[in-house]
Image (tube, rainbow, N blue to C red):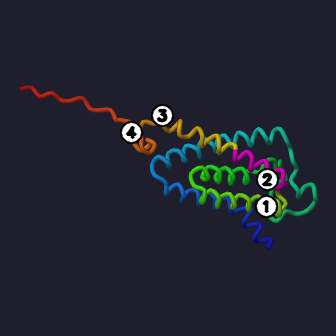
Amino acid sequence: MDQVIVIVAQYFVVLSVLIAGVFWLRLPAYGKWTLGTAGLLGGLVALGLIAVAGSLYHDRRPFVTEHVRPLFPHPADNGFPSDHATLTMFIAVCVLFYSRAWGSALTVNALLVGIARVLARVHSPLDIAAGYVLGALAAAAAVWAAPRIVRLIPLPSAAPPGAQAVPQPRRPAMHRRT
């Protein structure tokens, strides 16, 4: 059972990224632009939120306070908030805005990662909950901002469905002498 916890705690983050990547590939061009923009923008926002939250609150990891060995080697640094929980919930909420089924599957994956990290004694439930909140906030802000940013990109593939594509500059007409 410990080995399953370790695999979920350490490697299911990669599963979230892979699932989101497959989902992204299935989107039409406008969806790819907006989800990609949300991922980039929201990722930066999430990193900033993690840095601020970690500087405001310090939570020693459970294996340090309980004087036990974690299920896998981990530094005894600040555990607040959980980077893994933030990332997996960020991905899940971003995708949830596009697809309830895919987003729900990613949310379950995020919950499994959080539970496994608590069971592995590398995070407390508070670390995980804070990560979920920060990830969801970053995703919501990014998904809100992404279409507004993508509209500024002068590419035909960046037009929302049903809208006219951004016209490309025309070449000047060549006049022939007669």
**Quarter holding the N terminus?**
bottom right
Q: Which residue is mark 2?
A: 128
First in sequence: mark 2 or mark 1? 1
Distance from disc 4 to disc 3, alpha carbons, whole Å, reads 14 Å
Q: Give the camera-side residue of 68 and 26.
A: 26
The residue furthest front is: 162
First in sequence: mark 2 or mark 3? 2
**Quarter holding the C terminus?**
top left
First in sequence: mark 1 or mark 4? 1
The residue furthest bottom is: 1
Residue 56: x and y in percent read 83, 38
Looking at numbered disc 2 in the image, what kind of residue is underneath it? Ile
Magenta segment: does it hold 40? no
Labels 2 and 1 touching (C-beta < 8 A):
yes
Q: Which residue is mark 4?
A: 164
Residue at position x 68%, y 54% from top? 88
Q: Give the camera-side residue of 108 and 69.
A: 108
Distance from disc 2 to disc 4, alpha carbons, whole Å, reads 44 Å
First in sequence: mark 2 or mark 4? 2
Labels 4 and 3 touching (C-beta < 8 A):
no
**2 vs 4, front mark:** 4
Q: Which residue is mark 1?
A: 115
Tag 4 secondary structure: loop
Distance from disc 2 to disc 1, alpha carbons, whole Å, reads 8 Å
Residue 72: x and y in percent read 80, 64
Residue at position x 85%, y 54% from top? 124
Where, by quadrant of the figure, is residue 114 drawn?
Answer: bottom right
Which stretch appears magenta? 123-136
Distance from disc 1 to disc 4, alpha carbons, whole Å, reads 46 Å
